[in-house]
Image: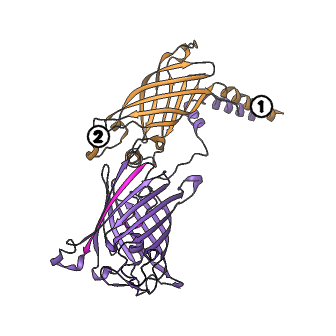
Amino acid sequence: MKKILLISLSFFSIFSFSQEKFISRNGQIQFIASTPLEIIDPVNNHVSCILDTEDGNLVFQMKMISFKFEKALMEEHFNEKYVESEKFPKSTFVGEIQNWDNFSWNGQEQKIKVKGKITIHGIEKEIIVKGMIGTSKSTISLSSSFDIIISDFDIEIPRLVRDKISETVKVEVNVTLKKKSNE
Amino acid sequence: MNRIIILLSCLFLSFSSFSQDDLLSFLDDENEEFLTFATFKSTKIINLQSVEQTKKDELNFVISHRFGTLNSGIVELYGLDYGSIRMSFDYGLTDDITIGLARSSSYKVIDASMKGRLITQGRKKFPFTISVYSSVFYDTLSPRWDNDDLLKNDFSFVNQILIAKKINSNLSIQISPTFTYYNFPSPYPWQNPQTGIPINVNKRMYALGIGGRYKVSRSVSVNSEWIPIIGSNSDMIHPFKNKTIINSFSVGCDIETGGHVFQLFLTNSETMFERGFINENTELWKDGGIHFGFNISRPFTFN
């Protein structure tokens, strides 16, 4: 009897949790490291993201190998030589939307600030980025654009191609989250 | 009762600590696959085809040279006076299917080829990448059949299975069981049409290519390959004891720059097409019959 109570309790807790999570597995992140010599603007269309509407906690995760470049050789070099996708297959962001308690669900696009830790190439860094949040009946959309510096993440660009790759990389994020279904 | 309290408190604890990092684990997918990439830097190990493909809508232009042998002395500047050339164009129909057309100056051979990848290492945790490679050779010189000059006599074929494993990010190995078929009519052995050197081949030849690479830095790898002949018609051939057929051995390095891969190496095979460098070698390493050679590949993208 006690056991049943416990189990049902635990189920209940999980159940009540999942109702407050919004998730996506096909968010989009593009980064732009173009220079006058070379256009570098790959897109990753398989970004996972989850938002806990209870407390505003926000997490992103993506496979680096899912970035699609215009030139296949560039894609291979990116994965093999720069971000070392075999050693560090995933990049993550773990953080929270600030002032979440004051958030009002009024359907308008609103400015947000997100603070957290971004991990690329195995290097963790604290960042604060500005973005926008929009809500509809069943979805939440998030977008942001911010700059990161390659050398902050211990990614070394060989001297030979240094003129072709921008040291500051613009990152553009677009995700549409759906309410996580209770499976 | 105590136990229940502990359990409950554990539950609540987990409840409350169920925060950002746990959210992260929500996103993990158990069936996630990490396909191996960049097993080799180039579509060739040295002479042998590697499991690397020309990417979709890309034209890979490879220009290859083999100089003369090192033992030809100072008069020939150790082989540098002489050079044979191969130009090849490979086009990626998809990321897994490549078609190619090439021409080699030695033997005056034109060849058409196809390489297809069957499975990539990492797919459903499969431990190898497996590809197949087929090529057909047309000997435009065809002087050896004086009395019987049928077109079909000028063709020969090579079929290979390429099995590669990227052991870690630096070390990759590959084995390539190879079958060669000559449409040439008897008599066998025949002679090299340019040099007159007898070549001990039969209609059906079997070989086992073995190759590998080790990355010594981000942009440089050391490569080597050995291709023992293991069968001739229905006869087995011992790779070390045979005295009639010379096996190909090559050692060299890959140097990668922004858009090119340079492969520089030493080899006892002068020919650059599969049938030739596998079966028709006439020089020995121990006699200094070593050619310096290079391949330069440059991809062009069509989108």
Callout 2: chain? A
Q: Nearer the viewer, residue A85 or A75?
A: A75
Q: Is residue B97 visible?
A: yes
Q: Which residues are magenta?
A: B44-69
Q: Secondary structure at mark 1?
A: helix
In this view, the mark in front (1 or 2): 2
Residue B66 lies in the magenta stretch: yes
Q: Quadrant of residue B102?
A: bottom left
Callout 1: chain? A
Query: How crowded is the residue under tag 1: few (<14 C-alpha within 10 Å), some, or many (20+)?
Result: few
Q: Which chain is purple?
A: B
Evaluate whether label 1 is on the same chain as label 2.
yes
Please report the residue visible at 60 percent of the width from the left and 23 percent of the height from the top.
A139
Name the colour assigned to chain A in the rendering. Answer: orange
The residue tagged 1 is A8
Q: Nearer the viewer, residue A61 or B244?
A: B244
Please report the residue visible at 27 percent of the width from the left and 42 percent of the height from the top.
A162
Compared with B177, A10 (above or below) is: above
Q: Quadrant of residue B254?
A: bottom left
What percent of the width, then of the height, locates residue B27?
Answer: 58, 36
Instruction: Classify residue A103 as left or right of residue B46.
Output: right
Query: How crowded is the residue under tag 2: few (<14 C-alpha within 10 Å), some, or many (20+)?
Result: some
Identified by mark 2, the residue type is Lys
What percent of the width, then of the height, locates residue A120?
Answer: 43, 38
Residue A80 lies in the magenta stretch: no
Q: Tell me the quarter of the image containing the N terminus of chain B.
A: top right
Compared with B35, B7 (above or below) is: above
Please report the residue visible at 46 percent of the width from the left and 21 percent of the height from the top.
A131
Residue ranking furthest to the left = B75
What percent of the width, then of the height, locates residue A49?
Answer: 54, 31
The residue tagged 2 is A164
